[in-house]
């Protein structure tokens, strides 16, 4: 995670870093049940931390200083609601399907949905500034 933030800050290319990290991370989770796991886990483990710093910096790009505390509170509230509510859903999918691949598919899809959400964020940000 720290390396991703450092790379984004030093060399720029935050969008490329974000999209490549998310694409490899999400795709890796989806293909994990189909291939030998060790190489996929190593690549996914290295790539999944890269976009985290970019994601955590997004709210500060759009929140005015007078609204930043409330906005960050909402951001972290939704983050932690996802952290505690989605693992039981993954477990329910495992119980329902009898295969851990269903839980991995949920995780992969949840990661890959970041790409259109990031695009919508940038689009709306551009409209607000333009």
Image (cartoon, grey):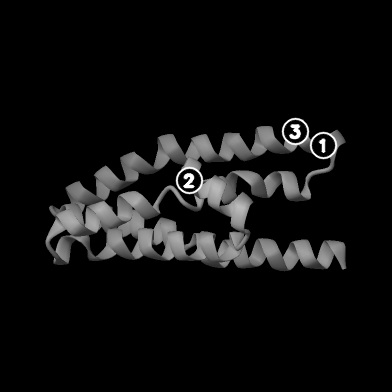
Q: Measuring from the top left, give residue 66's x and y in whole percent.
A: 86, 34
Whether residue 77 can be seen here: yes
Number of marks in the rendered image:
3
SS class, disc 3: helix
Residue matched to label 3: 70
Q: Residue at x 42, y 65 (%)?
A: 23
**Do callouts 1 and 3 mark residues in contact (Cβ within 8 Å)?**
yes
Query: Which is more N-terminal, label 2 or label 3?
Result: 2
SS class, disc 1: helix
For the C terminus, the image quarter is bottom right
Crowding at mark 3 (Cα within 10 Å: few <14, some 14-19, many 20+): few
Left or right? Give the position of 58 relative to 22.
right
Left or right? Give the position of 17 relative to 101.
right
Q: Residue at x 68, y 36 (%)?
A: 72
Residue matched to label 1: 67
Real-space CA distance between mark 1 and mark 3, rounded to the nearest whole angstrom: 6 Å
Residue matched to label 2: 3
Residue 53 versus residue 28 in the image, above or below: above
Q: Residue at x 43, y 57 (%)?
A: 111
Q: Measuring from the top left, give residue 100's x and y in whole percent.
A: 18, 52
Real-space CA distance between mark 3 and mark 2, rounded to the nearest whole angstrom: 28 Å
Q: Nearer the viewer, residue 97 or 83?
A: 83
């Amino acid at each position: 995670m720290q390396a991703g933030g450092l790379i984004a800050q030093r060399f720029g290319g935050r969008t490329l870093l974000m999209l490549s990290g998310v694409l490899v991370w999400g795709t890796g989770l989806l293909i994990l049940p189909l291939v030998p796991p060790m190489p996929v886990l190593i690549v996914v483990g290295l790539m999944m931390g890269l976009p985290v710093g970019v994601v955590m910096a997004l709210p500060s790009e759009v929140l005015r200083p007078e609204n930043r505390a409330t906005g960050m509170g909402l951001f972290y509230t939704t983050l932690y609601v996802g952290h505690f509510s989605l693992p039981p859903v993954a477990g329910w999918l495992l119980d329902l399907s009898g295969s851990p691949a269903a839980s991995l598919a949920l995780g992969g899809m949840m990661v890959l949905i970041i790409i259109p959400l990031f695009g919508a964020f940038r689009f709306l940000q551009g409209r607000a500034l333009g």
